[in-house]
Amino acid sequence: MPNSTDQDPNLQDPARLNQLRQSVEQSVGNIKVKALHALTQGQAPRAGEEGAGGAPSHYPVQWIQELHSQVDLLAQTAQLSTGAFACKEGCTSCCHARVEVTPPEVFAIANYLAAEQEDRRPVFISRLVSRSAAPAPESHWSTRPACALLVDNRCSVYPVRPAACRKGHSYDAQACKADQAELPLHYGFVLGAEVWMAGVAQGYEAAGFQSPILELCDALLKVLQNPQMQSDWLEGRSVF
C-alpha cells in the first residue's frame, strides 16, 4: 500500500526526475490535443459559434464528463492494484478542504441543481451566501467550514462532483479525521488525475474557452446568481 512517507530512490536521480517530468509534460500535451479535438472538431461548435436554435452549444459543459470518467477509471485501477480506499458514503473529512474547479465543472453543477424536479438553486444560493459570510478560516483544512453542497453528510451533487473531489482519497479514514499531516495515498493515482486535469484545462483554453482555476463555492455562487454567465462563457467571453 502506498504511503505518504514512502520515497522512491529513483526520484533522487536527476536524470530520472527529468525523464519523469518529460513524460508528464508529454501526457498533458496529449490530453490537451484530445480535449481540443473534441471541443472544436466533434459535436461542439468553436467558442463564439452558435449551436442549434441560435444558442451556443452546451457540449463544452457536457464534455467535462470525460475528465470525470477518466479520473474515476484511474481510481478504480489504483484500487485493483493496492486495495480499496477507506473513503465511504458519509465520510466528510475532505469536504472541508478547498476545492479547485474549472468553469465547465461549475456550470455542470449549476445545471444539475436546476434540472431536478424541484429547482434547488435558491436554497443553495442562501447556503453559499451564509458560507461566504463566515469568519476567515484558519490555515488547516479541517478548520474550514464544510462545503455548502454537503447536506446531511452527503454530497448533494455527487454525480457531477468535480475532478478534485474525485481525486481525493485515503487508505485510512481515521487518519483524515485525526488531521494527520501525512495521509496514506496512492500517488500514482494523484499524479494521473492531475495530468488529466491539467491537459483538459489546457484543451479548453486552446479551444477558446476561459479555463481559470476557481474556488468551488465562490464560483458557484456567482453562477447561480447570474445564469447568463454560462452563455457568455460558451460564446468565448471572459466571465470569471
Image (cartoon, helix red, strand yellow):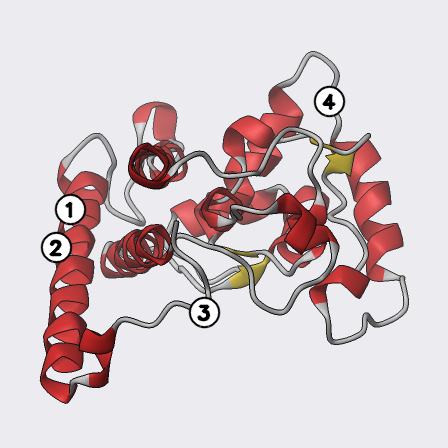
Mark 3 Cα-neighbour bin, 10 Å: few <14, some 14–19, many ≥20: few
Nearer the observer: mark 1 or 2; the answer is: 2
| Mark 1 in CB contact with mark 2 (< 8 angstroms) | yes
Mark 2 Cα-neighbour bin, 10 Å: few <14, some 14–19, many ≥20: some
- Type of the residue with mark 3: Thr
Alpha carbon distance from label 1 to label 2: 6 Å
Per the image, the residue denoted by label 3 is 5
In the rendered image, the vertical position of residue 159 relative to residue 33, given as above or below: above
In the rendered image, the vertical position of residue 14 relative to residue 193, given as above or below: below
Per the image, the residue denoted by label 4 is 119
Mark 1 vs mark 4: which is more N-terminal? 1
Q: Check residue 34 in the rendering and tell me which mark sits there, or answer none.
A: 1
Name the element at disc 1: helix
Mark 1 Cα-neighbour bin, 10 Å: few <14, some 14–19, many ≥20: some
Name the element at disc 4: loop
Mark 3 vs mark 4: which is more N-terminal? 3
Picture quadrant where residue 29 is located: bottom left
* 105 horizontally vs 2: left or right: right
- Type of the residue with mark 2: Asn
Q: Residue at x 63, y 47 (%)?
A: 223
